[in-house]
Amino acid sequence: MTETKKETADAGLSGMIHDGGDSYLSGKEPRNGSAGHSHAGLFGLMRYAAAVLIIVYIVFLMFQTSVSSRSFDTVASAVKDSLASSNLAERDGQRFKRNFGLNSADFDGVLYYSSESVMSAEEVLLVKVKSASQIRAVTEAIEERIAARTDAFEEYAPDQAKILEDAQLSVRGRFVFYAASPDGAKYREVFDSSL
């Protein structure tokens, strides 16, 4: 390459690198004619799409945490019906207190089912709290129970530990739902649709 051609090539490369960011190295087209407008249109479209996604996400979150107008009895009835063919038995407030450390009288409603067998980790719990401030206490009690029971079952019944690891926990408005069962997803679906 001759000296003049090399200087021209160097000047062209330098122009591409130092042209205010509009270079081939920055991935942008040079500003000439309609090429700059296509990027502005694409950027505007991307901003619009992002705004739509944010709105959809907010609506989704509002739906997930919406307060159901359903009574505890209505939701509990649907959950009970789904448990009719299971090996689970309905438990009283004393068993709920012993297993979760919470007093059933402190809530608008408690429905607790567990297995007859001590060798089974299966259980289903539905709680309607009186105020949103109680949600944390209920979810923490459930998480502590899952952790303690997983540790207990891990050594001698790994299949039961797996059921606990795959447990369903859902908070919808003032309702807290928990299911440790091979059919946990089905029970949660019934809970979700009953709200």
Image: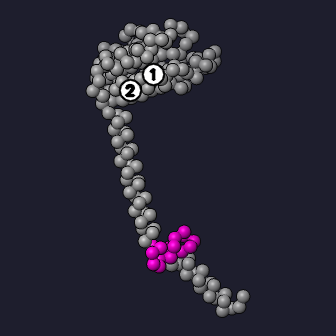
On screen, residue 171 versus residue 23, left or right, reads: left
> Residue at (37%, 34%) from the top-left corner?
64
Are circles 1 and 2 on residues that touch, CB within 8 Å?
no
Q: Judge whether residue 126 is colored magenta.
A: no
Q: Which residues are magenta?
A: 20-36
Count of marks placed on residues: 2
Dot 1 or dot 2: first in sequence order is: 1
Q: Quadrant of residue 11?
A: bottom right
Task: Report the residue marked by disc 1.
Answer: 187
Furthest-right residue in view? 1
Identity of the amino acid at label 1?
A: Tyr
Quadrant of the image containing the C terminus? top left
Identity of the amino acid at label 2?
A: Ser
Q: Is residue 137 visible?
A: no
- Is 37 or 3 nearer to us in this picture? 37
> Residue at (56%, 73%) from the top-left corner?
24
Q: Quadrant of residue 44?
A: bottom left
Residue 136 drawn above or below residue 53: above
